[in-house]
Amino acid sequence: MSAVPSATADQNATLEARLARFPAQQIWLASQRAVSYREANSAATNALPLVLLHGIGSGAASWVQQFETLGDTRRVIAWDAPGYGASTPVTPESPAAADYAAVLNEWLDALGIEHCVLLGHSLGAIIAGAFAVTYPRRVAGLLLLSPAGGYGAASAAVRETKRAQRLAMIEELGPQGLAEKRSAAMLSAYASDEARAWVRWNMSRVIPHGYAQATHLLANADLAADLVRYSGRVNVAVGADDTITTPAACERLALAAGTPLQVVPRAGHAGYIEAPAAYTAIIDTFCRASDGQRSQ
């Protein structure tokens, strides 16, 4: 057997051991749907909770490095989006962002979180934007990392092409094949082997039906339209080497939100995994500013 699979197995085992500090939990909502999640809960703090929304090829476990650092100063909680992990899928086969935002609202109610800092990565930014514009009083700050804009404003032909490509990919490759083929594109050339293994691990655990629904969401959504309507605090950051949601694309979303774009050197799309120190600093600074605004 080659050394590469063994090395990957060792890296996965190390990360899973770290993740064991933040075990998967599940809560049932009043609507009789389940949401699975992980959290780091600092009891000795009055800081705002930080709620993390993952992207299309990921899950709550991907935030382990943020749990380890930010969880010392505030409650940090990440969901498995509907259709991911043990979370009940949304009802529509071709959902809109509002379908996910409604589940997020109910989940926060169930957890007793009235007000939070909301962070969305990639597809999670679409859900975060829809939530913020629908429930603005619940959001002290909206932080978008490598946000996906969606194709809702594109032509019908473009929307259908993008949708069909992703649906065919998950049907043909399955989660493991998707991870092997697509995970490298999530990272920059500077990413460590450990970061690459962790992105693959998370992507290999997507559920095909949930991924298909998220593909429809991506085709249907228009994040820029939500950001234009949202008047709260927003920050947008992207890796300089992100080839999926490029700095140019994120610049357009930052413009819609009326905020400068922050570009992180030597980072790709999954920047919070491969450059955790830089991204944790961005998140922490934004959270502390949001805490300060609340106290004024």
Image (cartoon, rainbow, N blue to C red):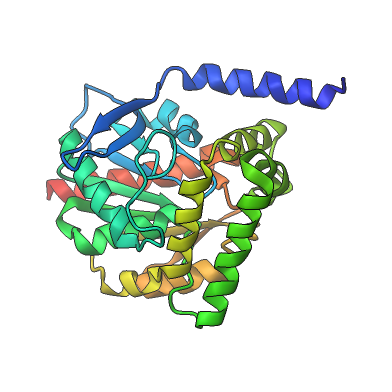
Compared across the picture, whether 55 is left or right of 51 comes to right
- Rendered residue at 26%/73% (across/down): 229
For the question of whether residue 247 can be seen, the reply is no
Q: Percent x, y for residue 6?
A: 77, 20
Q: Is residue 196 above or below residue 120?
A: above
> Which of the 4 image quarters holds residue 239?
bottom right
- Rendered residue at 19%/59% (across/down): 136
Q: Percent x, y for residue 150?
A: 47, 67
User: Which of the two residues, 291 or 56, is positioned nearer the viewer here?
Assistant: 56
Q: Percent x, y for residue 76?
A: 33, 33
Q: Is residue 243 above or below residue 173?
A: below
Q: Percent x, y for residue 143?
A: 37, 54
For the question of whether residue 151 can be seen, the reply is yes
Given the current orientation, which residue lies at the most extreme bottom position? 155
Compared across the picture, whether 266 is left or right of 263 comes to right
Q: Which image quarter holds the N terminus? A: top right
- Rendered residue at 76%/22% (across/down): 7
